[in-house]
């Protein structure tokens, strides 16, 4: 995640989901006993007339997006012959479940949302999505890989002949914004609205609350009472940081326009709450001298957005930010993490950004990029960001030897490790000139080629990468690779068993393979 300050989506039209149990599930099975059947719901808005099948059930979702299943079954949704990725059946299923991720930018999530919204018969997914029968007929003999580079081209004719008022594919930004509006009102995917849910971040569709304390058993550490931990203050554990020297161009585009950001930063903090994760109200970091604040856990957002900095179900939060006031530098000292729980307990912990090798900043005040034109008497230059102009950065592709070659000459003696990011330009099928860049793979820093070709400052690095070393996303091949970035790191420090951290990194300019 190369980044930039996170902004919350505000003033969004909140989609009202009708989650009450009514209507049928569209099942054509009559063999199961009624009390063994469960009801679930598919949403990117409730999706109606979406075909589904499990081991025991099949049919089409109703106007609330509801379907019928049995405990433990997997479910596959489909449009004509197009199967969406299968997943475990449950009370609430979204495109995130189908892709098996929490990342809204995952290609499968993006493309499933774009397709469903494009097939909506009246072209307005805010009032629900209804798949027309014509879409099922048009897709009867189709197969689609939702992570394939040619997804847009492969789906264009279906969208144009689907019976929808929309005849071209909904763009990525609109599709994700709509999906987020749907997800924001249900944080834990249990089909219970957050405002009515007694465990906002734990799925508990039955809302069981044995001790009647207002906190559901699923998130109550003492579900049978007494609440021995109630109102206990959270605790702040380890705080890790890194500082990122970013190029003017990333992934083929200017990273912020205008102006480019050259210094980003990461904060990774461990937070435990005896009353459970649901008891946390917000987690902020603040630069005290500048009085600038960023949120790691934001009470004004819900669902995926609220939890976007939380690493899985752990008690660790991590995000990459930048300051719009300090585009080319970062203050090293006088930072603070502030945590507040729902009982009003507030704890704080002061920290500094580490410099190279995890050292404390000492008398140094800032780290700066070459674009910074202020006082640098108490500063340290950021780790080098390689470029064609300054470092001779260039890449070649050799189909005959099935390899890539990357050449550059670093000048920064603090560089200890590096890896390669790989990118592809994918045409969208609309015109010969339109398309987008996709991050499609990488060469890890522990690959044989990189391990055998260390960077030595002042000496040209000639890296030969065999295609077998490249880790690619599904649907891409080495011949799809068009460009890349070299990402350099300072020394990795072991901060726990098999857990290493780098405190400084630099991302090169975008370079082409020739």
Image (tube, rainbow, N blue to C red):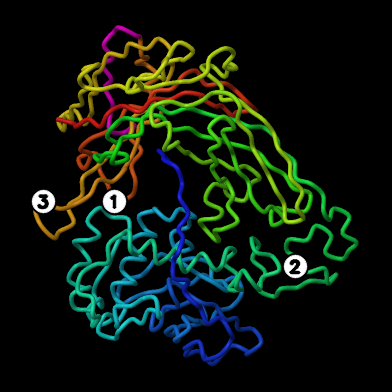
**Residue nearer the viewer, 216 or 282:** 282
Mark 1 vs 3, N-terminal side: 3
Mark 1 and mark 2 lie on one chain; the one further toward the N terminus is: 2
> First in sequence: mark 3 or mark 2?
2
Quadrant occupied by the C terminus = top left
Residue at image position (33%, 40%) is 441
Q: Which residue is mark 1?
A: 475
Locate residue 109: give its quadrant: bottom left
Residue 435: horizontal and vertical position, in percent?
19, 52
The span from disc 1 to disc 2 (Cα, nearest Å) is 43 Å
- Foreground mark, 1 or 2, reads 2
Using a 10 Å C-alpha cutoff, classify the residue at mark 2 as few (fewer than 14 neighbours), some (14 to 19) or many (20 or more).
many
Q: Is label 1 or label 3 in front?
A: 3
Residue beneath the point at 45% across and 64% down: 11
Q: Residue 180: x and y, percent?
A: 45, 63
Q: Which mark is residue 307?
A: none
Mark 3 touches mark 2? (CB < 8 Å)? no
Query: Which region of the structure is painted magenta?
Result: 457-469
Which disc number belongs to residue 216? 2
Number of callouts in the render?
3
Residue 193 vs 448, above or below: the answer is below
Q: Please give left or right for residue 454 compared with residue 36 in the image.
A: left
Q: Are marks 1 and 3 in contact (CB under 8 Å)?
A: no
- Residue 463 highlighted magenta (yes or no): yes
Q: Nearer the viewer, residue 155 or 52?
A: 155
Residue drawn at point x = 23 percent, y = 80 percent: 165
Q: Nearer the viewer, residue 395 or 465?
A: 395
User: In the rendered view, would you say 487 is above or below 308?
Assistant: above
**Residue assigned mark 3:** 433
Task: Give the answer, above or below, for where 368 lies relative to 105.
Answer: above
């Amino acid at each position: 995640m190369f980044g930039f300050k996170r902004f919350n989506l505000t003033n969004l039209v909140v989609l009202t989901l009708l989650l009450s149990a009514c209507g049928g599930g569209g099942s054509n099975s009559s063999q199961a006993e009624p009390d063994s059947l469960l009801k679930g719901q598919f949403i990117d808005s409730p999706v109606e007339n979406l075909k589904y099948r499990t081991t025991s059930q099949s049919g089409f979702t109703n106007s609330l997006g509801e379907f019928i299943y049995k405990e433990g079954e997997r479910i596959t949704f489909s449009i004509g012959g197009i199967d969406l990725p299968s997943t475990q059946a449950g009370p609430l299923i979204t495109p995130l479940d189908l892709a098996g991720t929490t990342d809204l930018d995952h290609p499968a999530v993006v493309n499933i949302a774009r397709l469903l919204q494009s097939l909506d018969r009246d072209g307005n997914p805010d009032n629900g999505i209804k798949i027309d029968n014509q879409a099922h007929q048009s897709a009867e003999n189709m197969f689609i890989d939702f992570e394939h580079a040619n997804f847009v081209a492969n789906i264009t004719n279906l969208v144009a002949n689907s019976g929808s008022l929309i005849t071209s594919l909904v763009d990525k930004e609109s599709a994700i914004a709509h999906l987020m509006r749907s997800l924001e009102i249900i944080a834990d995917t249990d089909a219970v609205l957050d405002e009515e849910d007694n465990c906002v971040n734990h799925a508990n569709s039955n809302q069981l609350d044995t001790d009647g304390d207002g906190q559901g058993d699923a998130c109550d550490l003492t579900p049978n009472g007494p609440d021995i931990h109630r109102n206990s203050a959270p605790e702040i554990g380890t705080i890790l940081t890194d500082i990122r020297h970013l190029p003017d161009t990333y992934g083929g585009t200017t990273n912020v326009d205008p102006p480019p950001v050259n210094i980003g930063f990461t904060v990774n903090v461990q937070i435990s709450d005896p009353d459970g994760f649901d008891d946390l109200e917000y987690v902020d970091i603040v630069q005290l001298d500048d009085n600038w604040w960023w949120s790691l856990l934001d009470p004004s957002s819900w669902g995926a957005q609220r939890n976007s900095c939380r690493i899985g179900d752990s008690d660790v939060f991590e995000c990459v930010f930048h300051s719009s006031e300090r585009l080319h530098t970062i203050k090293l000292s006088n930072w603070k993490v502030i945590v507040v729980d729902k009982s009003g307990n507030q704890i704080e912990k002061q920290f500094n950004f580490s410099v190279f090798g995890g050292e404390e900043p000492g008398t140094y005040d800032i780290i700066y990029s070459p674009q910074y034109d202020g006082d640098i008497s108490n500063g340290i230059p950021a780790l080098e960001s390689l470029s064609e102009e300054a470092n001779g950065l260039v890449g070649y592709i050799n189909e005959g030897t099935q390899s890539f070659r990357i050449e550059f000459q670093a000048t920064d003696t603090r560089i200890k490790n590096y890896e390669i990011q790989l990118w592809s330009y994918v045409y969208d099928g609309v015109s010969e000139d339109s398309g987008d860049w996709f991050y499609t793979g990488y060469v890890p820093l522990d690959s044989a080629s990189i391990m055998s070709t260390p960077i030595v400052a002042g000496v040209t690095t000639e890296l030969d990468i065999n295609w077998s070393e490249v880790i690619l996303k599904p649907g891409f091949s080495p011949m799809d690779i068009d460009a890349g970035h070299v990402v350099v790191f300072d020394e990795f420090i072991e901060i726990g068993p098999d857990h290493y951290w780098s405190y400084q990194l630099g991302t090169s300019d975008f370079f082409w393979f020739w």
